[in-house]
Amino acid sequence: MSALLDIKGLHVHFPVKKGLLQREKSYVKALNGIDLQVQKGETLGIVGESGCGKSTLARSIVGLQQPTAGEILFHGKDYAEASAKELHDMRRNVQMIFQDPYTSLNPRMKIGDSVAAPLKAYKKTERLESRVKELLELVGLNPDTHYNKLPHEFSGGQRQRVGIARALALEPELLICDEPVSALDVSVQAQVINLLQDLQKQLGLTYVFIAHDLSVINHLADRVAVMYLGKVMEKSERGAFHTKVQHPYTQSLLSAVPVPDPLLERGRERIVLKGELPSPANPPSGCVFHTRCPMATERCKNEVPALEPRGLSGQEVACFYPLVEKQPADAAKDPLYV
Amino acid sequence: MLQVENLHVHLDTPGGLVKAVDGVSFSIQKGETIGIVGESGSGKSVLAHSLMKLNPEPPALYPQGTIHFEGQPVLEMGKTELRKLRGNDIAMIFQDPMSSLNPVSRIGKQLIEAIQAHQKRPKQQAREKAIELLEDVGIADAKARMNSYPHQFSGGMRQRVLIAMALASNPKLLIADEPTTALDVTIQAQVLDLLKGIQEKYGTAILVITHDLGVVAHLADRILVMYAGKIVESGSAEDIFYRTSMPYTWSLLRSVPVIREGGPERLIPIDGQPPSLIDRPAGCAFEPRCPFARDACRQVDPPLEHREGNHSAACILSSNEFEEQKKQLEGVLTT
């Protein structure tokens, strides 16, 4: 079965000019060889810290960013080779939900008009008003009272609902969600997460869900890709997140998340990483994580580990020394293994 | 050490009088860590700023209530006394480490300034102290880093510099307003570790304000939960997390995803929005969103009542009644 979305060897480099005369060129390597597949109907979670390239990846998938190398196939069709007409159709099929519901809506446009905009752009103007009302209802807004309101009259959570309605207007197959809940208050976050889950079931949507919050990703995603400095470090299955984690980076990420449970928190052993994320303009040699890795050896400085099935679980991981899958005996000692 | 009694803080805005803090009482003992949890608009930042009378006046008004720091009434202090209090006895770190530093002045200069503002020390001594502080907060190669500008530092390092600055005069209380919200998780873990270390080393009391339940579970001995300008539940970390007695706290805990064995459960969101603080409806402020609300809740605004030990909650349901209701609802939700 061919995947809905197939990303092969994707590189995106941004040139930066340097030196007195701005003649020296160097590159910020935002994405450095990404391979990912997304099957129809599933949710692929992408998690990583700021600067790991996850937003560049999102922009590449919707075709807002030209790849430097590699290809992105949607239904087996490459963006770069598509004709203008095919591209028009592909863009309809892949929509995006943005992080900040405050800046992604035009403050002078009525909510109804914002949701209608993509329909007008694609000349689907038959029964426009009733379609917009249908969409508003779908995302849990009141189609009659909310239609003529302006964004400032809405709270953050309601605005994010408008953003979702707008993204769904053209009945896309694939939705790219770039940190859709991180700007929302905790109590409202859950409303939007549940809405996205319900819509997926109802409409058979496929999600690429990008977030820095591991617990949100773990909650929503069928498969998770962990990114660091423009590379995928590990791919993991749903629910396997804390028992089958093999990459030291994923493990340290996991141990860094504070859990809302005081006894657990006090008993946990934290792996606190040293230092900060290196600059993507000048990434470390070998394994890009070796400068902060607690287990790094000489080999890690010189050789690049490939992303391949390793260790006991057979999950794909880019590390020479994958952590062994936890045994029930170890699990008893690990408070996270409840 | 710090005693807040029935504090009211109002903000006089063109849209009306915002009752940001509406009758709050609590105290902080020497060397303890207190966490204030709440959503945006719950009044937690206004409350923290009032402890040093930092809210700009106008619009802030203090119509009622007192704050005593080591017996001294803070709200009655004049400019000179406040200047002594701020920075010397109580220091504060903020959410956004970039906007709290001067972008055109070197880190070292800003630190020396902060030290000399509170202590009469010759420049050379202040400089040595500054380097020592930077080393204390874990900045590598502190001596060379004194000459850097803020933009040359990453977010985590800037937050470390601000913590160093706050520690310059050995404060007795450190107020941290969302100290890690702008940081990545691995950097957040470093900063939380640092705060814990500082407390052990200097015995500083810490008041941490956050919306992240995980952060308070990690740091705090005692937790205050705020909603619509009031404290709705307070107690030890165990009381709040394991013996939750207020529907709002329970709803908050059930609405965040947690990584756990057996896969994720469906989240229970809190319907609706927090209420407007301008004209507060009669009755309990959480009533419109509360899954356990009953008629009486619309009439009575329950006060913060003592339960067991140091645990208090503001709800007309007793702890036992709430426990039963909770079980019923959880039963309905799982089936």
Image (spheres, coloured by chain):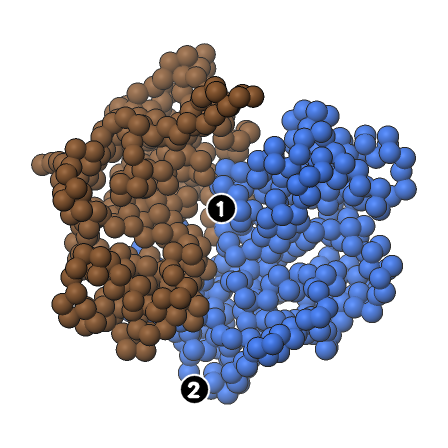
Chain colours: A brown, B blue
Above-or-below relation of A134 to A123: below
What's the residue type where badge 2 is placed?
A: Asp
For the C terminus of chain A, the quadrant is top left
Q: Mark 2 to mark 1: distance in Å?
A: 38 Å
Residue A164 location (% of width, % of height): 29, 59
On residue B295, the disc is 2
Looking at this view, is A41 or A338 the one in front?
Answer: A41
What's the residue type where badge 1 is placed?
A: Pro
For the point 50% across and 55% down, the residue is B213
Q: Residues within 10 Å of mark 2 (few under 14, many from 20)?
A: few
Q: Is residue A95 left or right of residue B301?
A: left
Residue B274 location (% of width, % of height): 47, 71
- Disc 1: which residue: A258
Q: Secondary structure at mark 1?
A: loop
Determine the residue located farthest toward the left in the rendered image: A1
Above-or-below relation of B324 to B204: below
For the N terminus of chain A, the quadrant is top left
Q: Residues within 10 Å of mark 1 (few under 14, many from 20)?
A: many
Q: Locate residue B333: give its quadrant.
A: bottom left
Residue B132 location (% of width, % of height): 76, 31
For the point 51% across and 75% down, the residue is B276
